Amino acid sequence: MISEKMVKALNDQINAELYSAYIYSAMQAYFLSVNLDGFANWMSIQTKEEMTHADKFYKFINERNGRIELEAIAKPQKDWKNALEVFEAAYKHEQYVTGRINNLVELAKAEKDYATESFLKWFIDEQVEEEANALKIVEMLKMIKESAGSLIMLDHQLAKREFEKD
Ligand code: FEO
C-alpha cells in the first residue's frame, strides 16, 4: 500500500522530469539558433531521456494503484551567453534533480515503503551518470575557451550521441 504523501511526491517528480525535458528542449533550440547542430542533437537526446524518466514514474504510480496527476510545466529559460553557460546550467540542474531523488528516497524510507525505495535505486544510479555527462562537457568547454575550431570539433562529436532506451 502506497501512501497519499508518497504518491504526491512521485507525481511532483513526473512534473520535475517533464520540466527537465522542457529545459533541455529550450537548450536544443538555443543551439539550433547559433548553428551548433551537434550540441542541439545532444540536447535532443537528453530531452527524450527526461521523458522516459517521467514515464517511469508515471507507470510506477499506476502499478502501485496510485492516481497520476499532471500539473502545469513552468516556462524554461530561452537564452544563454554561450555553450559553457548552457552546460553549467545543465550540470547545476542535474545536481538539483539528484537532491530531489535523494529526498524521495528519504521519504520512502520514512514511510517504510520498500517497493518505492527499490524503484528509486535506478534513479540514484542514473543521476551519477547524468551529472558526470554534463560535467564532462563543462570541463571540455572550459579547456576550449574561445577556440572556434575546437568548438566545432566538439560539435561534431556531440552530433554522434544516440538515444539508448533502457
Ligand atoms: Fe531525469 Fe536528467 O534526470
Image (cartoon, helix red, strand yellow):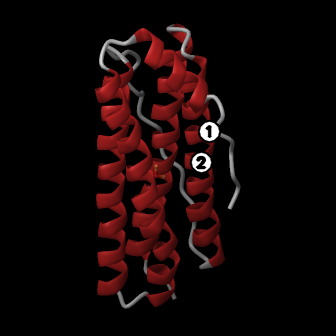
Q: Nearer the viewer, residue 150 or 65?
A: 150
The CA distance from mark 1 to mark 2 is: 6 Å
* Secondary structure type for disc 2: helix
Q: Residue at (57%, 70%) from the top-left corner?
A: 61
The quarter of the displayed image where residue 112 is located? bottom left
Q: Is residue 105 left or right of residue 59?
A: left
Classify mark 2: residues with Cα within 10 Å, few (<14), some (14-19) or many (20+).
Answer: some
Asked whether the viewer can see residue 40, the reply is: no
Residue 63's x, y, as percent?
Answer: 65, 76
Residue 110: mark in rendering: none
Q: Is residue 17 left or right of residue 159?
A: left
Residue 29's x, y, as percent?
Answer: 54, 18
Mark 1, residue position: 45
Q: Is residue 135 left or right of residue 121?
A: left
- Say if disc 2 is inside 8 Å of ligand 1: yes
The vertical placement of 55 against 3, above or below, is: above
